Amino acid sequence: MAILENEPSLLEALRGEMTPKFLATRSPEGVPNVVPCVSIQPAGDQPDTLFFGNFLLRKSIRNLESDARLAVLVITPELQGWILKGDFIEFQRTGPYYERQMNSGLLRYNAYTGVRNAGILRVRSVESSFRISKIQVALDYLRARLAQPASTPSSGASFIEMPLPVQREFARMVAVKVLAWIAPDGYPILRPALSLQPTGRGAMTAWLGSNLPVPPPGAPVTSNILTFEAISYQAKGQWAARGKAGTLQVQEIYAGGPPYPGGRVA
């Protein structure tokens, strides 16, 4: 039986036009990239096939054109989620997937532009599933705030000071935050990191106490935040771990939406 057919709750979440979904890709140098991609939908006519609209996804598109390996994270408003591993297939500039994206409620009235094309991907596996209670969110947020930031990885890399607007957004407890890194098999991997918050002007700490995968110490890691106001930032850097807490030492920050989607802000 097809993978997604065994997951009716996942299929229902994927069909949600406003359900938070994140797409992780990798650069030719093996650096993870992760962006919100709420346009991801199940194809319906092909098993284990998803499609998405190419809308403000410039870096992700370049990555997919050079390396088909990807990951998807889906999380519902009830904080039930799934982590998927998949492969990019192709872009289609015409046809039913493109038309479905153009006619979706998400893009029909957007003030910027329509999709350039529809991207097609194939799901290889459901890597993990999770459910997070609101009490757990609050506890993990407090634990991350109290945790001492882990030491800076000894790589000689330089770290930056996060702009205050970025610090303010990542300090929110009520927002969807994720981490992405490259797994040993070369695929990007994603996990929720709702407790991620600034613990210094150039670092962010999260409490990762669940049974989900965690980044290895020293790994290049990318985080992304999506707020209920559709504000998104992507922060890239290196990961340092201390027990169940981990710290992202920030090296780069990018805007995730208009007016400068994908533009570097620090």
Image (cartoon, rainbow, N blue to C red):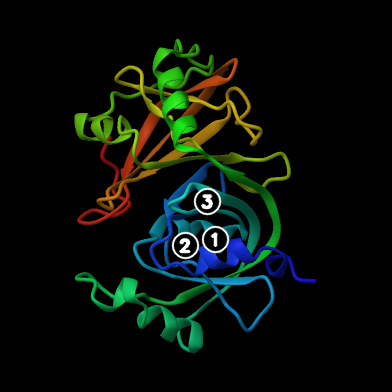
Expressed as whole percent of the image width and height from the top left, the position of residue 125 reads: 71, 57
Q: Earlier in the sequence, mark 3 or mark 2?
A: 3
Give the vertical position of 232 relative to 166 (above or below). below
**Position in image of residue 173 (x %, y %):** 34, 33
* Direction from residue 243 to residue 17 in the image, left or right: left
Residue located beneath label 1 in the image: 64
The residue carrying mark 2 is 61
Q: Which residue is mark 3?
A: 24
Mark 1 crowd level (few <14, some 14–19, many ≥20, 10 Å Cα): many
**As drawn, 25 above or below 124:** above
Q: CA distance from mark 3 to mark 1?
A: 10 Å
Q: Residue at x 64, y 36 (%)?
A: 212
What's the distance in space between the residues labelled 3 and 2, CA to CA? 11 Å
Give amino acid for label 3.
Ala
Quick one: SS at disc 1?
A: helix
Relative to 61, does residue 106 appear above or below in the rendering? below
Answer with mark 3 or mark 1, whichever residue precedes in sequence: 3
Tell me, yes or no, whether the two marked residues, 1 and 2, touch with CB atoms within 8 Å.
Answer: yes
